[in-house]
């Protein structure tokens, strides 16, 4: 198959997507129901917990596996669990990134409850936390207990207005439009006292970009990690509607290639295939088209720090949305499997020479509009 610039695929840890000229997805065959949970204009549930949770399931999360399981508890509480089958053992061997996704989830739930005049109190790991730093993965114990209590006068977070428009925008960013330093500062000072940093300085952006690209190649060259990503791919609108999670491959070229048997999971996973090579090339081009980076650092790498990093990242992502900026996590260089160790160490020396753990690294820039990623409905996540 000839793969043109307008119809290429992207493959890799970060995701795989069809890239087209402009908003191709407006005219392409799109999933029918997979975006329904993004319709927040639908009547809000009376139960504030369900309202908070319908926002929370829109959280960014690794490979969009949506690992949340929720059990309502009495009249005013909920327990949050990790669906242990929805993790990424090859790319995320210590469940660090999965835990960060839960942090994003909690921050969205908290904001949505506050918008209803209700305080959501979070007790993280009420039955204890498995170690976060290279020991103990998540287990059947709850991630958090949430208690909802009316609190008249609680302010609505200004970032809450941007929940439905937030995206992880995996496209190439416009290198002729630099990110203003003040805009980046608005993202890094996002209301929680934490270490969020960023740079628009080409002399700093360049070595970060080089490590991001190197990490991408490590990932593409590490078969078990790449296969895990391919396993999360949903090829074409029908698959996406049937399983509205994972990495959605959409658009006319995907539908056409899938229909004639060219785009298969086997081809996408096979480093010898033209499909793989074209995808890798395009993925590198998109990651290279980055005028600014943002990263979240924690002193420790325990579970509470990971949850906190997720909350902070989510706020930065919403702040970017409010400013019309695109953002895209690029986590390959942060992953803790053996083949990545050297890149991981070099990135840390570059970004946090004083010590600390980089929990999130994201591209920032001006990108084209992209559609929302698929979501399971809240009902599917309630136990
Ligand atoms: C901890 C974490 C790590 C992520 N790492 C990557 C990554 O390396 N590459 C990527 O393309 N997206 C990454 N993402 C973004 C997810 O793929 C994205 O959140 C998910 O597909 C849902 O899409 P949405 O954020 O647009 O709703 C990451 C998200 C989180 C929370």
Image: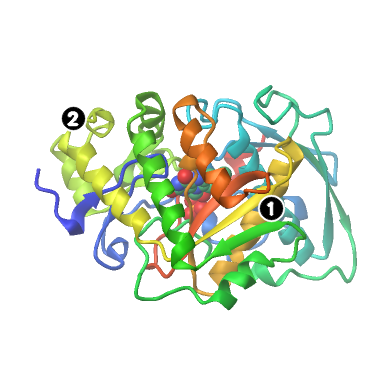
Q: Percent position (x, y) of residue 290?
A: 40, 62
Tag shown at residue 272: 2
**Circles 2 and 1: CB distance less than 8 Å?**
no
| Mark 2 residue crowding within 10 angstroms, few (<14) / some (14–19) / many (20+) | few
Question: Residue at coordinates 70% horizontally, 56% vertically from top-left?
Answer: 195
Is residue 91 found left or right of 304 in the rendered image?
Answer: left
Q: Secondary structure at mark 1?
A: helix
Who comes first in sequence, dot 2 or dot 1? Answer: 2
For the question of whether residue 299 can be seen, the reply is yes
Q: Which quadrant of the rendered structure holds the C terminus? A: top right
Where 49 sits versus 290, above or below?
above
Report the number of numbered marks. Answer: 2
Residue under label 1: 311
Dot 1: within a 10 Å radius of its alpha carbon, few (fewer than 14), some, or many (20 or more) residues?
many
Left or right of 29: which side holds 211?
Answer: right
Q: Which element carries disc 2, helix, strand or loop?
A: loop
Q: Is residue 141 left or right of residue 323?
A: right
Examine the image and state in which quarter residue 300 appears: top right
Q: Considering depth in this image, is 150 or 84 the residue closer to the camera?
A: 84
Task: Pick the residue in front: 263 or 189.
Answer: 189
> What residue is at 81 percent from the left and 71 percent from the top?
155
Residue sitting at x 54%, y 64%: 199
């Amino acid at each position: 198959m000839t793969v043109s610039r307008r119809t290429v695929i992207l493959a890799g840890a970060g995701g795989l997507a069809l890239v087209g000229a402009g908003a191709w997805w407006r005219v392409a065959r799109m999933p029918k129901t997979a975006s329904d949970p993004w319709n927040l204009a639908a009547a809000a549930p009376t139960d504030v917990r369900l309202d908070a949770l319908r926002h929370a399931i829109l959280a960014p999360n690794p490979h969009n596996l949506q690992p949340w399981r929720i059990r309502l508890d009495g009249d005013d509480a909920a327990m949050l669990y990790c669906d242990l089958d929805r993790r990424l053992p090859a790319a995320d061997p210590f469940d660090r990134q999965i835990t960060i996704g839960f942090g994003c989830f909690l921050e969205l739930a908290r904001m949505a409850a506050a918008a209803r005049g209700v305080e959501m109190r979070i007790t993280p790991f009420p039955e204890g936390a498995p170690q976060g730093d290279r020991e103990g993965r998540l287990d059947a114990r709850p991630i958090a207990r949430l208690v909802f209590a009316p609190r008249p006068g609680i302010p609505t977070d200004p970032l809450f207005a941007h929940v439905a428009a937030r995206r992880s925008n995996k496209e190439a960013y416009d290198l002729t439009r630099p990110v203003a330093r003040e805009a980046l500062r608005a993202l890094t000072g996002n209301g929680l006292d934490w270490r969020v940093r960023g740079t628009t300085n080409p002399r700093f952006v360049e070595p970060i970009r080089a490590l991001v690209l190197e990490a991408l190649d490590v990932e593409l060259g590490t078969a078990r990690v790449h296969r895990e990503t391919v396993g999360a791919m949903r090829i074409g609108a029908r698959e996406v509607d049937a399983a509205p999670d994972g990495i959605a491959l959409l658009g006319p070229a995907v539908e056409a290639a899938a229909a004639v048997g060219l785009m298969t999971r086997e081809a996408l996973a096979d480093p010898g295939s033209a499909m793989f090579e074209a995808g890798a090339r395009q993925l590198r081009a998109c990651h290279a088209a980055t005028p600014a980076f943002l990263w979240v650092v924690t002193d420790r790498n325990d579970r509470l720090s990971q949850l906190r990093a997720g909350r902070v990242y989510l706020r930065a992502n919403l702040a970017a949305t409010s400013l019309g900026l695109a953002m895209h996590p690029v986590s390959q260089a942060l992953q803790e499997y053996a083949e990545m160790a050297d890149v991981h160490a070099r990135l840390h020396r570059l970004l946090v020479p004083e010590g600390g753990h980089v929990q999130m690294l994201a591209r920032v820039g001006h990108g084209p509009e992209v559609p929302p990623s698929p979501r399971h409905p809240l009902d599917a996540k309630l136990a």
